[in-house]
Amino acid sequence: MGAVMILIYVLISSAVGVFLVGVALDLINLNLAASYLSRYVLFDMSSKVIVGILGLLIVLLCIRYLQSLLLRSRRERAITFESPDGTVDITLFAIEDMLRRALEDKKEISHIRPKILSRKKGLDVLIRSDLASEVNILDFTREVQQKVKEKLENILGEDKEIKVKMRIRKMVFAGTRRKPEEEPEIPFRNY
């Protein structure tokens, strides 16, 4: 449903934008467009009803799309647990920080940036990092994914589905490091 709403929103926005640009550049004559609509599109009551319903449907789909965007941005970035003594909220930022610290002991990766998205079914974990040594990438990433999944299952319990995805952004090996570039001398800096 989300892809359909996005497609409709893009098509309507593009059509309105092209229409307004055409009117501004005098490519579209408003009087001619109005007479065309009254003569060929809105010539009887049934066509007026169809156009009205179509317009109402488009407006409702756009409102629904905007509502889903607002709800997605407003959704709390926390996981809530119910205990006999009350509720416990753990922010996703705290879990991301814990994962970053847990993976810092791995010398094979650097610049670790975990991102956690809370879904109805469970958690989606994306770990972006740089590879800092030559290793078997498939074995190493599988090991890291298992470690992250086990860590989260120990903390959150096994009732949530956890999907761990790794993204290696670049490979920086010890032998290929560049020397720091010298800053260019700024003329007349010492005067």
Image (cartoon, rainbow, N blue to C red):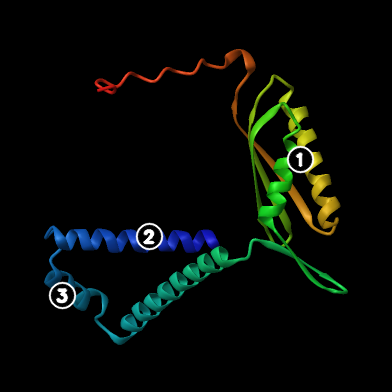
Query: What amino acid type is highlighted by mark number 1?
Result: Ala
Examine the image and state in which quarter residue 62 appears: bottom left
What distance separates the C-alpha of mark 2 from that of mark 3? 24 Å
The residue at the point 73 percent across, 41 percent down is 101
Marks 3/1 in contact by CB < 8 Å: the verdict is no
Disc 3 versus disc 1: nearer the observer: 1
Hey, which residue is sitting farthest front in the picture?
Answer: 191
The residue at the point 74 percent across, 37 percent down is 103
The residue at the point 47 percent across, 68 percent down is 66
Percent x, y of residue 113: 63, 41
Q: In this view, does 77 lie to the left or right of 61?
A: right
What distance separates the C-alpha of mark 3 from that of mark 1? 69 Å
Q: Which of 111 and 124 is in front in this view?
A: 111
Query: What amino acid type is highlighted by mark number 3?
Result: Ser
Helix, strand or loop status at disc 3: helix
Hey, which residue is sitting farthest top in the picture?
Answer: 175
Q: Which of 136 and 184 is in front in this view?
A: 184
- What residue does disc 3 label? 35
Disc 2 versus disc 1: nearer the observer: 1
Label 3 vs 1, first from the N-terminus: 3
- What residue does disc 2 label? 11
Q: Which of 171 and 142 is in front in this view?
A: 171
